[in-house]
Amino acid sequence: MQELKLNSYYVKKCKNIGPIIREIRDDNTVTMVLYGHKKKNKLCYGVVVLADEDIFIVKKLNKDKEYGERFTFKVSSNKTKHSYLCGIFHTKNEYTSSDHLNFRDCYYGTIYTFRNQYNFVFGSCRFFPNIFGRGILVDRTDKPFKSILKIVNKYQISALFFIGDSVYMDIVKWLPFRLKDEKDINRIHITARTTPGFRKLRSKIEIKEIPDDHEYRDNGDPSYYFKDKKAYTNCINAINTFQISSGPHLKNENIKYWSYFKRQNIPFFMLDSRYERWEDENNNKRIMSEEQFESLKQSLLENKNNNLPFIIFCLIQFIL
């Protein structure tokens, strides 16, 4: 799939929202994403500091200014709450260890890693509507994430799995036009991901998402967008950039809407039952690609002797 770059509007809008926790593995390895951009003739660096863990990482953010950068580190296993500082800074010359860090944007946060159990929340259909390319009812749609924030520590919540319809591009379907412009489509995703509750939650725990139909049209009917390939492409690009990556799309990242992974040895499979559907000339239909189906079968066989549950998230009900 084509590599995506974030437009400058996204970078400027989101530069102060703090990091994105991309992944927290069972061995307490954390992958965090920071992003920034060059300022005139200055280089841009990202830094992550966990003083209690003796972790100090400085990395130059990709010279293609609109890409994110991964920071991977391992935190202590004898505690569940890890305080960190991160940010970006600019310098005219290459950074050396003796340089003073002059932060442009700084964020203090906490990462939670729970070892004795694995609790998660899941949901879908965040009714984040739009009209004329503007998000409406923003405060209302942020309440679920603020509620989760209140119980993260009490109930040891490790992750949020969001199963589609994080935005509604078709709220204006009764009007004689549709959103087509890349800026309007991106604005909806941007606004949805910069609400205070959501952006704070994704700086603390892992969030994984898969898209469903309303990210481009109700009931998965692509007929309108296939008539306007530019609009359809803009919707798909926005999904890849803002939703699947849970933040800025990372350079050279292979994008799939489905995924198989384990947490605390519990197997999870997030199925894509929407975007890999196809029908051949003989009217034979499939709900997923052969690659995804084989991966699902292999993962089930791999865990057949596992006494823990195999958890499958899917957009619709169907029988294998």
Image (tube, grey):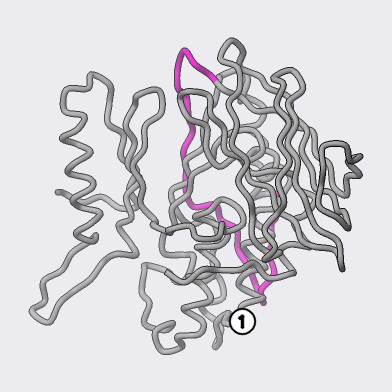
Examine the rendered structure and indicate whether residue 3 appears above or below residue 98.
below
Q: Which of 43 and 131 is in front in this view?
A: 43
Q: Quickly name the residue at label 1.
A: 181
Quadrant of residue 78 within the rendered picture? top right
Name the residue located 84 percent from the left edge and 49 percent from the top edge. 89
Q: Can you give x and y, in whole percent of width and height, for residue 158 in the image?
A: 53, 28
Horizontal side of 6 relative to 317 (left or right) equals right
Q: How many labels does the image show?
A: 1
- Element carrying mark 1: loop
Task: From the viewer's side, name the closer residue of 276 and 320.
Answer: 276
Residue 316 vertical position relative to residue 222 in the rendered view, above or below: above
In the rendered image, residue 133, in percent from the top left (x then y), is placed at 66, 74
Name the residue nearer the viewer: 42 or 68.
Answer: 42
Relative to 66, is 280 above or below?
below
Name the image quarter holding the N terminus: bottom left
Q: Which residue lies furthest to the left in this view?
A: 282
- What kind of residue is marked 1? Asp
Q: Where is residue 260 in the image (x, y as percent from the top left)?
A: 33, 42
Residue drawn at x 61%, y 57% is 248
Magenta residue check for 129:
yes
Q: Does the magenta stretch include residue 289?
A: no
Q: Residue at x 56, y 22 (%)?
A: 113
How crowded pointer 1 is (Cα within 10 Å; few <14, some 14-19, many 20+) is rated as some
Q: Position of residue 15 (x, y in %)?
A: 77, 54
Query: Which residues make up the magenta segment?
Result: 114-139
- Whether residue 183 sits left or right of residue 177 in the image: it is right
Q: Is 215 on the left-hand or right-hand side of 316? A: right
Q: Is residue 258 left or right of residue 235?
A: left
**From the viewer's perspective, is residue 58 above or below residue 230?**
above
